[in-house]
Every structure is written in structure tokens, then in C-alpha cells.
Image (cartoon, helix red, strand yellow):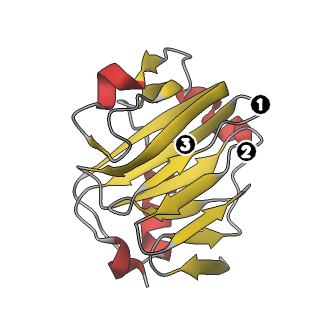
Amino acid sequence: MNKEWNKNFFIKTDFKVNPNFWKTYYNNNWQDSNKLYSEYVSDVTGGKNMNKFYVQEIKNYDIRLLRFIKNLWKTFNIRPKEFRCNFFKVLVGGEIPLHADAASKCSFVIPITENTGELYFDDGVETASIMYDTMVVLNTKKPHGVRSPNKTRIVFHMGIHDVAFEKLF
């Protein structure tokens, strides 16, 4: 797997997953992220809500999905004990405002649909932004957000709670 990185904010890879892989895990039971994640997100925008942003949690991990997840960990030489997986959906006109995650230390994000919403970072010292169509790993302790996509954006997300982003290098 080839990697390109910004040591403060993200690692961009060339890793892609066929969208059909996710069909078994997808049930279209979306929940409003403001209700589901308000306690896990440290909002740095002064109370701005996550707009048109929905979450579908993954609670059943079969052998196929566990093997997939463990292979990702192996690639980065980590072995987390605390993590959660879900799908995120941002509708046209929606956004995820600048925030830092309270629970996760890093997140693996894999696009399922075409990704037209720019991912951006701003920690008050440095800013960065990327468009991606392959897996990225985020430093979720740094303020990050997603700008409004021009098509519905759906990604697989794995938040790692016990491995710091800096351990991935």
C-alpha cells in the first residue's frame, strides 16, 4: 500500500475497496449524527450542528469483516483493543463542521460512493485539505471537518480509541 501523509493531520493511501464488499453490512438504517455522536465530538465551531449528516452503526462483525479490519491493522502494524465501525452519510448541502473527536485518536475512512466533499483540517497553526477516492487515516484529535458534497457522500469509518495517530508512522 502506497502512503502519502501530512504528519499532523492525515495519511492518504492508494487502498480501494469494491463498493459491493459493503452490501452485506449496509441496512440503510440511518440515524441523525447530532443525536448519536454529540457526546463524542468536541465542537470547535461554537455550537454549529452537523448538518445532513447520518450514521449507521455496524454491530455484527462476521469473519469476513473482521479479517478485513485485521488486515488494515496489520498494514499499519497496530493491534487496537477499542474501536467502532460505522457508515457515515452526508447529503448534498450538508456538512460536518470543524471538530475534534473525544473518543477516537485516529480513524480509517474508506469512500463507498464518489467523494465530492472536501476533508479539511485547521488546528489554529496549520491548515490542510484533501479530496480523496481511496482510504485515508485521520488524526481525529486535530480539528477536522467535511465540506458540503455535490453528491451524497457515504464512507466506511473505523474509529480507533486506543492507538494514537503518531503510532502509525
Residue 135: x and y in percent read: 62, 59
Give, as a three-letter code, the residue at label 3.
Phe
Task: For mark 1, give the secondary structure.
Answer: loop
In this orientation, which residue lies closer to the viewer: 71 or 154? 154
Q: Quadrant of the C terminus?
A: bottom left
Circle nearer the N terminus (3, 1)? 1
Which residue position holds label 3?
156
Residue at the image position 72 percent from the left and 40 percent from the top: 19
Identity of the residue drawn at 42% across and 67% down: 73
User: In the figure, 53 relative to 107: above or below?
Assistant: above
Residue 20, relative to residue 3: is it above or below? Answer: above
For disc 1, the neighbor class at 10 Å (few under 14, some 14 to 19, many from 20) is some
Dot label at residue 151 = 1
**Secondary structure state at the residue bearing disc 2:** loop
Please state which of the two labelled residues, at mark 2 or mark 3, is closer to the viewer: 2
Amino acid beneath label 2: Asn
